[in-house]
Image: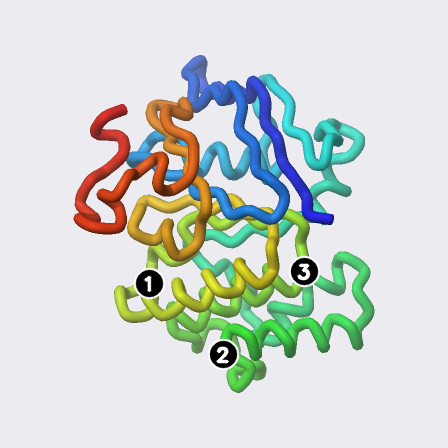
Amino acid sequence: MTSSLVAENVNLKRGGQDIFHIEKLALHGGEVLALVGPNGAGKTSLLLTLALLQSPTSGNIAFNGVIAGNGNVLSLRRRMAVVFQDALLLDTTLLHNVTIPLRIRGVSKVEAAARAEKWLNRFGIAHLASRKARRLSGGEAQRASLARAFALEPEFLFLDEPLGALDYPTRKTLLGELGQILKDMHMTTLFVTHDFTEIPYLASRVAVLYEGRIVKYGTVREVFGEELLESKVWTPWESA
């Protein structure tokens, strides 16, 4: 059974200022929802809140109907994985970077090694398993970060511009691979990006965040029309 996420009346304030106010945002089980918007719209702040890495000022976030609260936040986090723009790898081998989170979550040593091998192979970096993280290229490091996240077999995956720091050839190759993996896994995923041309490769629906509010919400075609697929020069907040 696939997992769903629903946020209702979720508000975040800092220093008396509204960062975002979301009346309702839903991720259907197994779908990839792209969250886009201009710089400063609150995309990363919203992702961190939905991933329970920071608390909202008010509102409810529910996972399969269970509202996140003080007593269950840690258990809910263990059902998630987050990948950021920076790989955030530990100064140890690539293999160790993938197995450490699994061991922390109680996965046996044998099972952790098997999962690590599976996902390092899937992302094409199994031959680098014994290499220290500091000796990886940017693309290799981000592949390792993605392998680490998928090895956790999360119900909910949060991707915060995971390809944003990569050069164009590396980004294009990894984008196609990641898109296929997400289709194969049917994992409930929130994908934050500033580059809306990535969306058709990964997402089926889109939410546009503008000045802290969702101003457009629907399928890729409903939100962008044909402009995204044809001209690739239009930005959705121009008409927000």
Amino acid type shown at disc 2:
Gly
Its colouring scheme is: rainbow
> Vertically, is 14 above or below 105?
above
Question: From the viewer's perspective, is residue 116 above or below residue 104?
Answer: below
How packed mark 3 is, by other alpha carbons closer than 10 Å (few <14, some 14-19, many 20 or more), is: many
Compare marks 1 and 3 and give the one earlier in the sequence: 3
Residue 24, quarter of picture: top right
Res 152 label = 3
Q: Secondary structure at mark 2?
A: loop
From the top left corner, tell me how far across and down residue 3 is, in percent.
Answer: 68, 44
Query: Whole-Å distance between the Cαs marked 1 and 3?
Result: 24 Å
CB of mark 2 within 8 Å of CB of mark 3? Answer: no
Nearer the observer, disc 2 or disc 1?
Answer: 2
Quick check: 77 left or right of 54? Answer: right
Q: Earlier in the sequence, mark 2 or mark 1?
A: 2
The residue carrying mark 2 is: 124
Q: Earlier in the sequence, mark 2 or mark 3?
A: 2
- Residue at position x 49%, y 65% in the image: 180
Going 35% across and 30% down the picture, which residue do you hit?
A: 41
Residue tagged 1: 166
Q: Which residue is depicted at the point 53% across and 28% down?
A: 25
Task: Give left or right: position of 47 versus 171.
Answer: right
The one of 226 and 127 positioned closer to us in this rendering: 226
The CA distance from mark 2 to mark 1 is 16 Å
How many angstroms separate mark 2 from mark 3 (CA)? 18 Å
Query: What is the secondary structure assignment of the residue under circle 3?
Result: loop
Q: Image quarter for residue 65?
A: top right
**Circle 1 Cα neighbour tier, 10 Å, few/some/many (<14 / 14–19 / ≥20):** some
Amino acid of disc 1: Leu
